[in-house]
Amino acid sequence: MNLFLKTILIGTLSFGVISCDQQNKEKESPIKEENLTTNKEVKRYGWVIKVKPEKLDYYKELHANPWPEVLEQISKSNIRNYSIYLKDDHLFGYFEYTGNDFAGDMAKMAEDSVTRQWWKETDPCQEPLDSRKEGEWWASMEEVFHHD
């Protein structure tokens, strides 16, 4: 699979099972203040994929204890508010992109060796939807409503 497209669909990374967020609240944020004020536009992304029932516990375990290097790479890639939700056998991912070069940031993420190793752990837990676009791993979702 094309690494760029796979990176765009990085729901496998830590779309943030709640315990990840709770653990990281105690740490100093790697987000620099200037990044918050200079990036005026935020692009929101939503994705969906099936989770294999026999792999669900392992997937949850991975995301309850995400690798710090993976979380650091997510932040360096200008991704914020990264979450994954589970309903029945579907994972729904959401994140906000605050950078100025999405393709470039995703390419850098795809080059990261720790992230690639993380994907080797998470990918076997997932089953892409038949309705996804060509080249997608997680199927992109259309935003039909947003309110700040």
Image: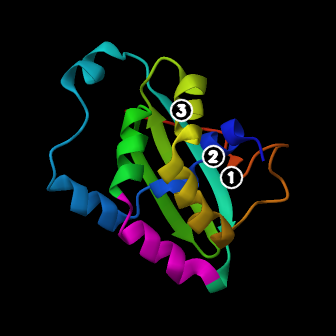
By secondary structure, the bulk of the magenta-drawn segment is best described as helix
Residue identifier under label 2: 9
- Count of picture labels: 3
Distance from the alpha carbon under mark 3 to that under mark 1: 19 Å
Region of the chain picked out in magenta, as a range: 55-67
| In the rendered image, the vertical position of residue 102 relative to residue 20, given as above or below | above
In the figure, is residue 67 to the left or right of 93? left
Residue 146 left/right relative to 52: left
Residue extending furthest bottom? 54
Q: Which residue is mark 3?
A: 108
**Dot 1 alpha-carbon crowd within 10 angstroms: few under 14, some 14 to 19, many 20 or more:** many
The residue drawn where x is 65% and y is 74% is 89
Q: Which residue corresponds to the image point at 42% horizontal and 51% vertical from the top-left? A: 70
- Badge 1 amino acid: Trp
Colour logic? rainbow
Q: Is residue 65 magenta?
A: yes
Decide: marks 2, 1 in contact (CB < 8 A)? Answer: yes
Task: Please name the residue that numbered disc 1 is placed on.
Answer: 138
